[in-house]
Image (cartoon, grey):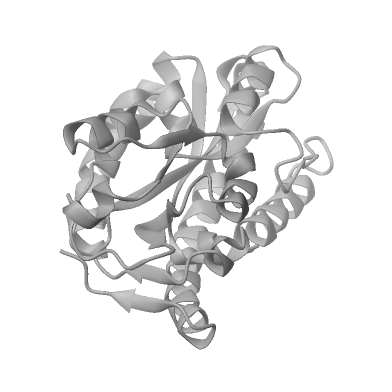
Amino acid sequence: STWMNVIAEWAGKVEKESQGRLKFKFYPGGVMGDEPDLIRKIRFGQIHGAAMTGHGIGSLYSPARVLEIPFLFRNYEEVDYVRAQMMPEIRAGFRKNDYELLGWMEVGFVRFFSRTPIHSMDDLKKRRIWQWQGDPLSAAFFTASNIAPVPLPITEVFTSLSTGLIDTVVAPPLGAIALQWFTKTPYMTEVPMADGIGGLVVSGKFFNRLPKDLQELLLRTGNEASEKLLVETRKDNEKSLGVLKQNGVTFTLGW
């Protein structure tokens, strides 16, 4: 994935500039479990950090998820403006909670992918829609919308789409392709539900043990990597829309 490629490139840069004093070991592809599992392992010292989406970020500093409020943003210009105003507060919030935010990314505008077309909230209420298990923001949205979702960890979504336990998911175009969810959901709403956030995070305990020069190196290069990821992820999501069309996914205007 683009995330893994850019992060691996970042790791090489850190190792080179630190003259081998700081190296990364990665566990890609979900081998360490879902995001709540990652947070648990960070707290127990099994891993030092992780690349997370909003679900995990919300467990570390919940106010950051204001950037994921459903139907808040219409375009990336609005997203970038609001995020720029909030980043100092968000970074300070992570630090106060004993985490260091090395870089801020996003997974992109999240859409509804479904087995049958969705044109309205009434259509959505008839669907067996996935809710990321343990995610309070999506739970609040579904409750407010009078929708009864099916809570599942992300690792069980594809199987549940295959068995019919669920028939609708939320994901950015790139994520729907990477996770192969689009093969089970031939319809996608064009109206984005929210802008999915992401971040590169390490534990404050680990970060604070590092010499000052390595702390500065991590922050500088982490920010550079996240800026590159932001640009590349948006490009990939745009390309993914074309890939979805080529594979027969029908775009519905939504409400």
Where is residue 78 drawn, in percent x and y? 18, 58
Does residue 189 sit above or below 16 in this rendering?
Answer: below
Hey, which quadrant is residue 141 in on the image? top left
Does residue 182 sit above or below 49 in this rendering?
Answer: below
Q: Residue furthest right?
A: 20
The residue depicted at 76 percent of the width and 53 percent of the height is 12
Hey, which quadrant is residue 39 in on the image? top right
Which image quadrant: the N terminus? bottom right
Q: In this rendered view, identify the residue nearer to me: 27 or 82.
A: 27
Q: In this rendered view, identify the residue nearer to me: 101 or 131.
A: 131
Q: Is residue 46 left or right of residue 249?
A: right
| Count of labels in the image | 0
Which image quadrant: the C terminus? bottom left
The residue depicted at 32 percent of the width and 30 percent of the height is 139
The residue depicted at 34 percent of the width and 24 percent of the height is 62
Q: Is residue 128 left or right of residue 179?
A: left
Where is residue 201 drawn, in percent x and y? 55, 33
Does residue 14 sit above or below 133 in this rendering?
Answer: below
Q: In this rendered view, identify the residue nearer to me: 112 or 17.
A: 112
Where is residue 242 drawn, in percent x and y? 46, 84
Hey, which quadrant is residue 38 in on the image? top right
Where is residue 183 drawn, in percent x and y? 58, 68
Q: In this rendered view, identify the residue nearer to me: 119 or 201.
A: 119
Does residue 113 sit above or below 140 in this rendering?
Answer: below
